[in-house]
């Protein structure tokens, strides 16, 4: 957790420094996730079912010129997946503190703009739950080792597109998890987050 907050602080300091050089507009984002976790073990892929979650948080737009900008953010994002391993049913619903750093290219008029964006993200698991066969709900344990459910940190790549109308942007994005979030140290298992997101966001222009 301390590492998550240290990284968040570094983002805030970076944005504050950038404000000297360029116009920075803060805002918010909220939306839905359709997420899944790809699970591979012993060279085979285990079928998983998608889960629906939400994401929300704060964003910043750092205008570089009329068409290009940077969009860092600090977002809470609920992800997860349902699995069936042999005869065992398992549902994982982790909650991540996520920091994307996107580059955006926008075209159009002041009234309507089309935007394309892409960039990396890192994330830290801060909560969530799991449901095992029998229906008992438990908290997710983060860490490395077979006694845990997921590793703390995730990282990957985001890309998507959106339409901005009268200050509000509706966007769709795909998030590819590139880090192996499996905590297992005894057998090789690979787990990766993948998320399709639909979002509504808005900025608060400087007066």
Image: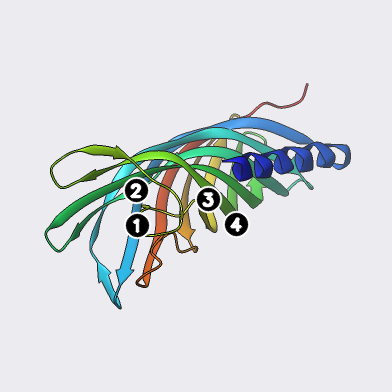
Cα separation, mark 4 vs mark 3, equals 15 Å
Q: Nearer the viewer, residue 115 or 12?
A: 12
Residue that carries the numbered disc 4 in the rendered image: 120
Residue that carries the numbered disc 1 in the rendered image: 37
Helix, strand, or loop for circle 2? loop
Residue 139, relative to residue 81: is it above or below? above
Residue that carries the numbered disc 3 in the rendered image: 161
The answer to whether residue 167 is left or right of residue 197 is: right
Residue 127, image x and y in percent? Answer: 43, 38
**Comes first in the chain, label 4 or label 3:** 4
* Label 4 with label 1: CB-CB less than 8 Å: no
Q: Which of 90 and 74 is in front in this view?
A: 90
Residue 119, image x and y in percent? Answer: 61, 56
**Comes first in the chain, label 2 or label 3:** 2
Determine the residue positioned at 39% across, 44% down: 94
**Comes first in the chain, label 4 or label 1:** 1
The answer to whether residue 17 is left or right of residue 106 is: right
**Comes first in the chain, label 1 or label 2:** 1
Characterize the local packing of mark 3: few (<14), some (14-19) or many (20 or more) Cα atoms within 10 angstroms: some
Instruction: State the quadrant of the N terminus.
Output: top right
Determine the residue positioned at 76% across, 36% down: 24
Residue that carries the numbered disc 2 in the rendered image: 80
Helix, strand, or loop for circle 1? strand
């Amino acid at each position: 957790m301390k590492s998550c907050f240290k990284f968040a602080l570094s983002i805030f300091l970076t944005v504050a420094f950038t404000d000297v050089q360029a116009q920075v507009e803060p805002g918010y984002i909220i939306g839905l996730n359709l997420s899944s976790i790809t699970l591979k073990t012993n060279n085979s892929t285990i079928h998983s079912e998608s889960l629906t979650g939400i994401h929300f948080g704060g964003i910043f737009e750092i205008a570089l010129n009329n068409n290009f900008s940077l969009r860092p953010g600090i977002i809470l994002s609920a992800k997860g997946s349902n699995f069936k391993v042999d005869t065992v049913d398992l549902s994982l619903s982790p909650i991540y503190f996520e920091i994307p750093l996107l580059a955006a290219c926008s075209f159009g008029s002041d009234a309507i703009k089309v935007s394309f964006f892409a960039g990396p993200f890192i994330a830290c698991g801060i909560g969530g739950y799991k449901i095992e066969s029998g229906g008992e709900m438990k908290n997710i344990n983060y860490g490395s080792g077979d006694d845990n459910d997921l590793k703390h940190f995730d990282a990957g790549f985001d890309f998507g597109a959106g339409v901005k109308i009268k200050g509000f942007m509706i966007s769709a994005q795909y998030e590819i998890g590139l880090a192996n979030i499996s905590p297992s140290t005894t057998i090789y298992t690979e787990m990766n987050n993948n998320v399709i997101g639909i979002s509504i966001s808005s900025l608060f222009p400087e007066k």
